[in-house]
Amino acid sequence: MSDTIDLIMKNLGDALGTVQKALALPKDEERIVVDATIQRFEYTFELFWKTMKRLQEKMGGEQVPLLKMVLQKAYQLGWIENEEIWLAMLEDRNMSSHVYKQASADEIYSHIGDYYIEMQRVYEKLKGIK
């Protein structure tokens, strides 16, 4: 991998680490734990799809302009095994970025543990791409 891809993968690994740390915090009455975990999920998801886009373009030289197309291509390439959970992540990311309601935030927060496991699985696959 090139130095640029190595840096991108390091940044992605660091972002995943921040999600893991947020998930380890006790969810108590402080909304800041929920809010911080959602924020960390949002930027990690963004970095994930942009990393997959860069890798796809590097491999095939073709531009993949839309987020959903990047996810579909990643599924076709076998990087993503569970396309449904990535589409659910996209939906939650869109909801959390545009509308803030406490009930919605709690719902999204309840999914992030499963999302983290899936993101970690895909990260390990992406690290193996040359």
Image (cartoon, rainbow, N blue to C red):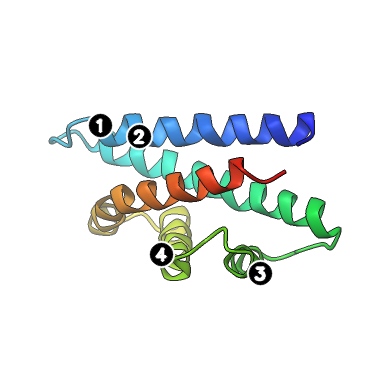
State how far apart marks 2 and 3 are (Cα): 27 Å
Tell whether 60 sits left or right of 21: right
State how far apart marks 3 and 4 are (Cα): 15 Å
Q: Quadrant of the C terminus?
A: top right
Residue 85 is labelled as: 4
Q: Residues within 10 Å of mark 1 (few under 14, many from 20)?
A: few
Q: Residue 116 at x, y = what percent?
A: 37, 46
In terms of sequence position, does the residue under pointer 3 or pointer 4 come before the other? 3
Q: Disc 1 on helix, strand or loop?
A: helix
Q: Residues within 10 Å of mark 3 (few under 14, many from 20)?
A: few
Residue on which the image places disc 2 = 20
Residue closer to the observer: 86 or 127:
127
Residue on which the image places disc 3 = 69
Report the residue at 56% width, 36% height from top.
12
Q: Single out the residue that lies furthest toward the left.
A: 29
In terms of sequence position, does the residue under pointer 2 or pointer 3 come before the other? 2
State how far apart marks 2 and 1 are (Cα): 6 Å
Q: Residue 104 at x, y = what percent?
A: 28, 59
Q: Is residue 61 above or below residue 35?
A: below
What number of labels is visible? 4
- Identify residue type, mark 3: Met
Residue closer to the observer: 5 or 22:
5
Residue closer to the observer: 26 or 128:
128
- Identify residue type, mark 2: Gln
Report the residue at 69% width, 29% height from top.
7
Q: Disc 4 on helix, strand or loop?
A: helix
Q: Name which quarter of the figure residue 57 lies in.
A: bottom right
Q: Residue 21 at x, y = what percent?
A: 33, 29
Q: Quadrant of the N terminus?
A: top right
In terms of sequence position, does the residue under pointer 4 or pointer 2 come before the other? 2
Q: Disc 2 on helix, strand or loop?
A: helix
Do the residues bearing badges 2 and 1 touch, measured as CB atoms within 8 Å?
A: yes
